[in-house]
Image (cartoon, grey):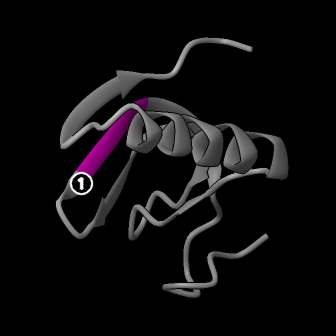
Amino acid sequence: MTCTDCKHGIPVPGKTTVSYDKDDTTIVIREVPALICPVCQAYYLDLDTADRVTRMVSEAVQNGAVVEVIKMRAA
C-alpha cells in the first residue's frame, strides 16, 4: 500500500500517538499500533484499533476528562 497522503512512502508497522480535541476536551492516546508512513508520518489504524481508540475517548469524555493522556495497552 502506498501512503494516501504523500503518495511516496510505504507504511510500515509501528506505534503512534492519537489525539482528540473537541470543545473543552483533549484526549491523547500513546503507543497506538498503526501503519506509519516513513516519509510523511501519516498513520493508518486497522478497524479493531480504531474501535478501541473510539471507546477509550468516549470513556474519558463520559468520565468528565478535560485533559487526559492514556497509554494503550496490548489487547
User: Which amino acid is tagged 1?
Assistant: Thr
Q: Measuring from the top left, give residue 31's x and y in whole percent.
A: 45, 27
Q: Measuring from the top left, give residue 7's x and y in whole percent.
A: 58, 87
Q: Which residues are magenta?
A: 26-30
Give above or below for 16 relative to 41.
above
Residue at image point 31% right, 44% down: 27
Crowding at dot 1, Cα within 10 Å, few <14 / some 14-19 / many 20+, comes out as some
Q: Nearer the viewer, residue 62 or 33?
A: 62
Task: Please identify the quadrant where the N terminus is shown.
Answer: bottom right
Q: Is residue 57 magenta?
A: no
Q: Is residue 27 magenta?
A: yes
Q: Nearer the viewer, residue 59 or 72?
A: 59
Q: Is residue 13 visible?
A: no
Residue 75 in the figure: left or right of residue 71: right
Residue at image point 74% right, 14% down: 75
Residue at image point 52% right, 61% down: 37
Q: Measuring from the top left, give residue 28's x and y in whole percent.
A: 31, 41
**Circle count:** 1
Q: Is residue 28 visible?
A: yes
Q: Nearer the viewer, residue 67 or 14?
A: 67
Residue at image point 18% right, 43% down: 66
Residue with the most extreme top position: 74
Q: Measuring from the top left, give residue 56's x and y in whole percent.
A: 54, 35
Residue 16 in the figure: left or right of residue 68: right
Q: Nearer the viewer, residue 8 or 31?
A: 31
Residue that mark 1 sits on: 25
Give above or below for 8 relative to 15.
below
Residue 31 in the figure: left or right of residue 7: left
- Figure quadrant of residue 34: top right
Dominant secondary structure of the magenta stretch? Answer: strand
> Is label 1 in a helix, a strand or a loop?
strand
